[in-house]
Image: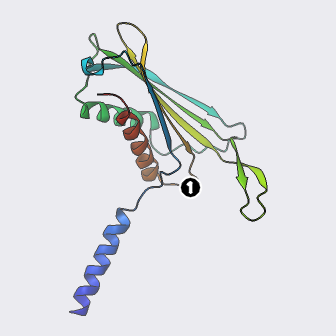
Amino acid sequence: MNKFISLIMVVCLVFLSACAIVKTDDIRITADVDPKANFSAYKTYAWLGSATVLKDPDGRWKPPSFDADSEIKYLIDRELRKRGMNESSVQPDMIIAFALGLDMDALQLKVDQKSKFGTLENVPKGALVIVAVDSSSGFVIWIAEARANLQQDVSSEESKKRLDYAISEMIDKMPR
C-alpha cells in the first residue's frame, strides 16, 4: 500500500511540474482604441506584414530556436478567430500588422534595499506591437503593446508560453 501511495505522489509531482507557471509578471500590456470604430462590424482581416527591430551592437542576442514571426502570426490568428473573425484576402474589414523590437542595451534603475542607493544595470527589453487598421479608411482603429524584460536562458517552450500570454492579453483588450 505504501508503494502505491508513493507512486501516486510521484505521478502527481511529475504532473504538477509539467504545469509549472511561466513567469509573466514583467509583461506590461497597454492598448488604445479609436472610440468611433464599430468593432462589431469587423468580421474579416488580412495581414499587412511584420517587422523586427533589433538593437544589439555587441551581438548578445540569441534568437529562439523557433520562427518567432510565424508563432506570433499563429497566436494572433487564433485569438482573432476566437472572436469570430476570419482571414480574408478579398475586401477584408481590417488589416493586421505587428512589429517586434528588442533592445539588448536597455538600462534600468536598480535600488539596493539596504542602502537605498540606485545604480543603472543592463536589463534587455523586448516589445511587441499589434496594429489593426480599418481597410476602407486606412486609419488605425486599435493598437496594443506588450513590453517585457528579455528572459535569459529560457527554453523555446517557455518563450512560446510568454508570447501566448502576451498576445492573448493584448487581443483581449480589443473591443468586441
Residues packed near mark 1 inside 10 Å, few (<14), some (14 to 19) or many (20 plus): few
The vertical placement of 61 against 53, above or below, is below
Whether residue 131 appears in this view of the structure is: no
x 45%, y 43%: residue = 66
Q: Disc 1 on helix, strand or loop? A: loop
| Left or right for 145, reference 83 | right
Q: How many marks?
A: 1
**Is 129 in front, or is 176?**
176
Horizontal and vertical percent position of residue 8 = 25, 80
Horizontal and vertical percent position of residue 47 = 37, 21
If the image is split into quadrants, where does the N terminus sit?
bottom left
x 42%, y 52%: residue = 157
x 25%, y 17%: residue = 41
Q: Badge 1 is on which residue?
A: 153
If the image is split into quadrants, where does the C terminus sit?
top left
Q: Quadrant of residue 20?
A: bottom left
Q: Quadrant of residue 3?
A: bottom left
Which residue reaches farthest top?
A: 137
**Is 136 in front, or is 34?**
34
x 34%, y 74%: residue = 13
Whether residue 79 appears in this view of the structure is: yes
Which residue reaches farthest bottom?
A: 1
The vertical placement of 29 against 159, above or below, is above
Horizontal and vertical percent position of residue 148 = 55, 43
The vertical placement of 32 against 27, above or below, is above
Three-letter amino acid code at disc 1?
A: Asp
| Left or right for 125, reference 142 | right
| Left or right for 111, reference 99 | right
